[in-house]
Amino acid sequence: MDQQEQTEAEQAPPGYREGKDAVLKRLRRIEGQVRGLQRLVEEDQYCIDVLTQVAATTKALQAVAMQLLEDHLAHCVQDAMTAGGDEARDKVAEATRAIARLLRT
């Protein structure tokens, strides 16, 4: 992220602001899942049981990512599209890069 993008990102309210409490609640639940994974490994639990919990935790993180992406598109990108010009092009490119990062994981 270059200096201009960082400055704009710091000034704009996040698209998830209205659902912030729900996002935090989900992240705390995921944090608990990760602690549970640590316990499973510490207790030498069966590999498949650990892998099953890893898959569940991964899906939970993906669900948070999708919600954040949806909020970003519905607020930040939509607002930029309304404004048009360079701002719209930049926000679409930014969202495209974020989607590409999510697909690589």
Image (spheres, rainbow, N blue to C red):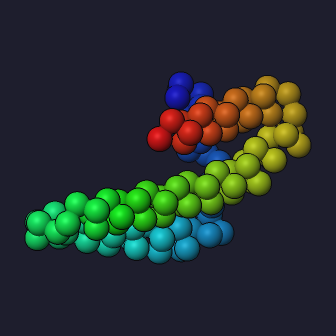
Q: Is residue 67 left or right of residue 34?
A: right
Report if residue 90 is visible in the image: yes
The quarter of the picture where residue 17 lies is bottom right
Residue in front for this viewpoint, 87 or 37: 37
Vertical position of residue 105 compared to residue 68: above or below = above
Report the residue at 47% width, 41% height from top: 105
Q: Is residue 66 left or right of residue 33?
A: right
Vertical position of residue 38 compared to residue 2: above or below = below
- From this viewpoint, which residue is outermost toward the left? 43
Report the residue at 48% width, 71% height from top: 26
The quarter of the picture where residue 66 lies is bottom right
What is the x, y in percent for residue 2?
53, 25
Residue in front for this viewpoint, 6 or 61: 61
What is the x, y in percent for residue 47?
22, 60
Report the residue at 68% width, 57% height from top: 71
What is the x, y in percent for residue 50?
27, 63
Q: Is residue 36 left or right of residue 41?
A: right
Vertical position of residue 88 compared to residue 32: above or below = above
Report if residue 87 is visible in the image: no
Residue in front for this viewpoint, 42 or 5: 42
What is the x, y in percent for residue 15?
66, 56
Report the residue at 78% width, 28% height from top: 89
